[in-house]
Image: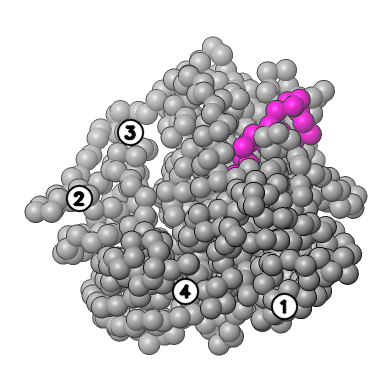
Amino acid sequence: MRMRMPFGGCRQGETGGKRKSLLFLKKKKQKDFYPFGGDTPTPMCPHAKGAKVFCFFFSKKKFFLLFLLSSPAHADRAQTIVAAMTQAEKLTLLRGYFAISQHRKPADAIGSAGYVPGIARLGIPALQETDASLGVTNPDDVRPGDTAVALPSGVATAATFDPQVAYRNGAVLGREAAARGFNVVLGGGVNLAREPRGGRDFEYAGEDPLLAGLMVGAAVKGVQDQHVICTVKHFAVNDQESQRTTLNVVTPWPALRESDLLAFEIAIARGHPGAVMCAYNRIGGAYACENPVLLTSILKQDWHFPGFVMSDWGAVHQVGAFTAGLDQESAADLDSQAFFGAPLKAALANGTVTQARVNDAVTRILRAMDQAGLLDKPAKPAESVPADIATARQAEAEAIVLLRNEKNAALPLPHTLKTLLVVGANSDAGVPAGGGSSQVTPVSGYARRIELGNDGMQGYFRVAAFDPPAPLATLKARLPGTRILWADGRYPRQAILLAHRADAVIIFADQWEGESSDVPDLSLPSGQDALIAAVAAANPRTIVVLETGGPVLMPWRNKVPAILEAWYGGSGGADAIADVLLGKINPSGRLPITFPVSETDLPNPVVAGMYQSPGAAVSVDYPEGSDAGYRWYARTGKTPLYPFGFGLSYTHFALINLQVEGGQTLVISFDVKNTGPRPGADTPQAYVTSRAGKPGLRLIGWTRRTLAPGETQRVTITADPRLLADFAPARSMWHLSGGSYRVAVGPDAATPTLTGAANIDDHLLPP
Ligand code: BGC
């Protein structure tokens, strides 16, 4: 077995200090150091060419430290190419073009969000950049008639707590992108969902840095294994859409290091993205794409990121962004001027930008291309739509969270029902998709599109689209002996009358989320709360299927026997929902985001800047600091409606026999047993609940185990020490205070089934 590095990464140019800090691992017995994914040392060190790299190898009997120090004279391939480039060629790679207009796009562009010309003389291909967080997009139908498989939303994928699902999704994205000739996927959204009304929470991977980092890192690796560069975005703290292009986040850096930035750090260490896309907002006064602390000190120096930073579309405001650490201006035609064009040349001429910085930026871009294999002209892969839809369906089936199943009786639905009523939420058309640049034109085309209105960018993005097939048709096909009635839900009286005649009711309820605006509150819109309450009063066997981007309030919760959270399900959505409702799949999803009882429990009762005029100078100091999501509920003693990590099953599980070891980190072992009647998957989670006397809840690991009835498995989780640390700004290092660390293991963040403690040695870790 091989020992894995913390967060699974080998770093470039590490020194003896790092070596010392990691040697403690030698003392430990082999554990599931990271029970997630299956990295091997080689892909962990893809940037090793010509660099000093430490890799750790471990066998059951022996532990070897292999220190590879290759000659610095071995310049990497990127540097060799840079040495052969003219200045004009170098500058070509630093400026991108907007490519979504059929009429205005550069001649060689396939048609997508962005394009950077190549250099044929040197065999450098053009960068053809497509949005593909949830499927390859086709904005404005720039490639007439092109459709793609829509994967479940990012938050849905996170709800699987299964990095292998994220990896497989990433592989679908990478393959479908490459099959169309794209070589850059603008994916990897890893902003923390600290604001549950955030308009892009559906694209991201929840509120916890470890979960988000591991899931997005796995997805990025899945994309890049298809010879396509993947980004992680939006770096950083683009955690809300209100005022996104001007918002100034003034939450202190150490708090961000322990939350938002940690999610990026983990995703980068696990996925090795070729590029990082910086965000629209400001942090500590400076725009993210012009922020030297963020881009240079943290990303490039502390984390040794070897790839390049590209800007978000229209996020550059001055040529100084280049010296701050931005390497490539994306779609420069969207900025007030193409700063990395003539102004960059002028800055070079007057000495405010150095040639070394230009060479560094170009080297980074070429290194990312080389790492993804783009310089070797990879063959176009074949696409298989049926196989990719099957992957999407499987991902969604694992993502659906069973929130309620009274007396375990309401679900699964028996196939013997005489009459079933299906209500609402466009269930006759498809499953909802989130709006904005991630919106996929699904295979077979949109099932329905409803323009929600507004002007400018908001109007453009505010389209509620639905992916086929329809849940109604799918249920009809799956229940041939059942009479299925349908009501659209616009007239509650009609739904009530039909509910009286049915043996059971499935009511679909949706909430639309989209880029560039946040949802005003967490209620289900358009009277759906009242509709559910009325239908439930008419038929006690009313099952609610939520199709939301994130949390919603549920004033009717105690009136219905069963609730499923199905998120935005994508091309496999309707089938996966039917699989879970009918018991073909035993639900195993877990909430990657807390569902609050009320907005008054949120750190910010109103989204900062939501009601100010567009572009207002708004600053926000997120009051929860590093305690985003469930950590905030633990800190304030508030009880959520459904806690982070929560999810039921059609079977039951028990957690027993906890053991906790300390030292340099926590090693937690316990048994998980399926005590119920069916096979099923459980996701027990380990949290630290206090560190050297300082209370505070943090997820430090989990495992997802599929168990037969009566089966028991022993689990061991070893915490990455950074999850136990505070970021100490004075030393710019992670600090683990010495003392007793308390641990809870349970089915979610609010249920400490097993508790224990162990001592941790006082020590520091590099940033
Ligand atoms: C979004 C990015 C996206 C880019 C290109 C921006 O508005 O924030 O996520 O990749 O557009 O479409």
Instruction: For marks 1 and 2, give the one nearer the viewer.
Output: 1
Where residue 616 appears, as percent x and y from the top left, is 83, 62
- Left or right: where does residue 147 sit relative to residue 178? right
Where residue 53 appears, as percent x and y from the top left, is 28, 43
Residue 736 higher or lower than 40, as above or below: below
Instruction: For marks 3 and 2, give the one nearer the viewer.
Output: 2
Question: Mark 3 packing: few (<14 Cα in 10 Å), some, or many (20+)?
Answer: some
Q: Specify the segment rendered in magenta.
A: 132-156
Q: Amino acid at mark 4?
A: Asp
Q: Is residue 655 magenta?
A: no
Mark number displayed over residue 245: none
N-term-proximal mark, 1 vs 2: 2
N-term-proximal mark, 3 vs 2: 2
Q: Which residue is mark 4?
A: 748
Q: Which residue is mark 1?
A: 556
Dot 1 beta carbon under 8 Å from ligand 1: no
